[in-house]
Image (cartoon, rainbow, N blue to C red):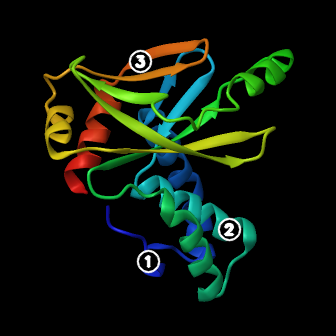
Amino acid sequence: MKSLAIDDIQNIYEYNRQRTKIREKMVALKRKRTLSLGPSLLVTFENRETIRYYIQEAVRAERALKDAAVHQLIDLYTPLLPGPDELCGVIQLNITKKEAIQPVLHQFQQLTRPQTIWFGINESEQVYGTFEMEGNIRQPAYTGRFQFSKPTRDMFCDPNTAVSLVIRHDSYHASSPVQNDLRTELIQDLQTN
């Protein structure tokens, strides 16, 4: 996926004028790119537009007016862009009840173990994610990368092929079909990388 450069980032004044419209567009885009993986996890797959939005918001929040400060923010967020034949997702805990926070946090402490989350393709192929924890133990987010081989990428991009995102982590097991808008978005990501 094409990297972001300073010319891709609007200055604060331009961005503020368009922010409401951009924000509405991003909320809709992120909704299309998010999948519930069981009752406790949400996976949002990143692309160039979502990363640009994070940078724009960071530039605004930090009042980054100088090119050097904007470059630092680009460097900070660019690692979230997927590489060739790769999808990148951020996994967040979906906790709505205060009393559930500690048990769920404890349950997912070791989410970075290998072969925990994968794309199941036609029930015959798996593309495993590799994950790193970001944030802190109270508000963890996990960034995962799914590296496809050419054959698994081609299978994933065939709309007639069944694809699911699967987790097997201790006692938490879930599988969610990757379809409709999300599937279209991810196919586009893989085809433009």
Find residue 162 and report its image quarter. Answer: top left
Q: Nearer the viewer, mark 3 or mark 2?
A: 3
Find residue 95 and report its image quarter. Answer: top right
Counting from the top left corner in percent of width and height, residue 30 is at: 48, 40
* Residue closest to the eye, 21 or 112: 112
The residue lying at 59 percent from left, 68 percent from top is 76
The numbered mark, 1 or 3, whose residue comes first in the sequence reads 1
Q: Is residue 63 left or right of residue 14?
A: right
Structural distance between the alpha carbons of marks 1 and 3: 35 Å
The vertical placement of 92 against 61, above or below, is: above
Residue on which disc 1 sits? 5
The vertical placement of 156 against 52, above or below, is: above
Asked if the residue at tag 1 contacts the one at tag 2, i.e. Cβ–Cβ closer than 8 Å, the answer is: no
* Residue closest to the eye, 189 or 137: 137
Counting from the top left corner in percent of width and height, residue 17 is at: 59, 66
At label 3, which amino acid type do we have?
A: Ser
- Report helix, strand or loop for mark 3: strand
Is the C terminus in the top left, top right, bottom left or bottom right quadrant?
A: bottom left
The numbered mark, 3 or 2, whose residue comes first in the sequence reads 2
Q: Nearer the viewer, mark 2 or mark 1?
A: 1
In the rendered picture of this protein, how many numbered marks are placed on residues? 3
Q: Is residue 187 left or right of residue 6?
A: left
Q: Is residue 95 left or right of residue 154?
A: right
Residue on which disc 3 sits? 176
Asked if the residue at tag 2 contacts the one at tag 3, i.e. Cβ–Cβ closer than 8 Å, the answer is: no
Badge 1: residue crowd in 10 Å (few <14, some 14–19, many ≥20): few
At label 2, which amino acid type do we have?
A: Arg
Is the N terminus in the top left, top right, bottom left or bottom right quadrant?
A: bottom left
Residue on which disc 2 sits? 60
At label 1, which amino acid type do we have?
A: Ala
The residue lying at 49 percent from left, 14 percent from top is 174
Disc number placed over residue 32 in the picture, else none: none
